[in-house]
Amino acid sequence: MPRLLLPAPVKRTEVVKATTPADDVKSLDPAVPESVAISTQFERVVVIRIKKQASLLTAIERHVAEQKIRNAVLALGVLPDNQSVGLKRFDDKTWRQA
């Protein structure tokens, strides 16, 4: 009789450290740089545009499954209806206002 092998359960523990009012009023550490740039390569970029009042989670889950995305970094941008933003595009060593 064949034996059925099941995956072992995974135990996960989340440690949450709440800040205190004393932590909130601390000044920034001068040893930490103001910004950091990291160069990397991406295999692909998927842009998902979601209609107003649509479920954000449902849309992301659907497109992740459709596009077979296994690892991702989400960069979300939300603007009020009456605002727009001018994005800068990089094109062959020149920056221009979009």
Image: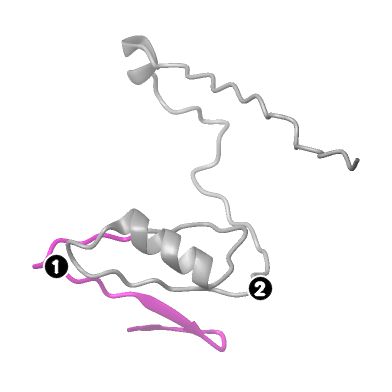
Location of the N terminus by quadrant is top right
Dividing the picture into quadrants, the one containing residue 75 is bottom left
Q: Which label was assigned to residue 83?
A: 1
31, above or below 19, in the image: below
Q: Which label was assigned to residue 72?
A: none
Q: Residue lying furthest front in this view?
A: 1
Location of the C terminus by quadrant is bottom left
Q: Residue 17 in the image: x percent, y percent?
A: 47, 16
Q: Which stretch is magenta?
A: 77-98
The magenta stretch spans residue 85: yes
Looking at the rendered structure, the kind of residue marked 2 is Glu
Front position in the image: 81 or 97 = 81
Residue at figure coordinates x 19%, y 71% from the top left: 84
Tag 2 residue:
43
Dividing the picture into quadrants, the one containing residue 60 is bottom left
The magenta stretch spans residue 46: no
Q: Residue 95 in the image: x percent, y percent?
A: 45, 82
Dividing the picture into quadrants, the one containing residue 40 is bottom right
Front position in the image: 51 or 23 = 51
24, above or below 5, in the image: above
Residue at figure coordinates x 69%, y 29% from the top left: 9
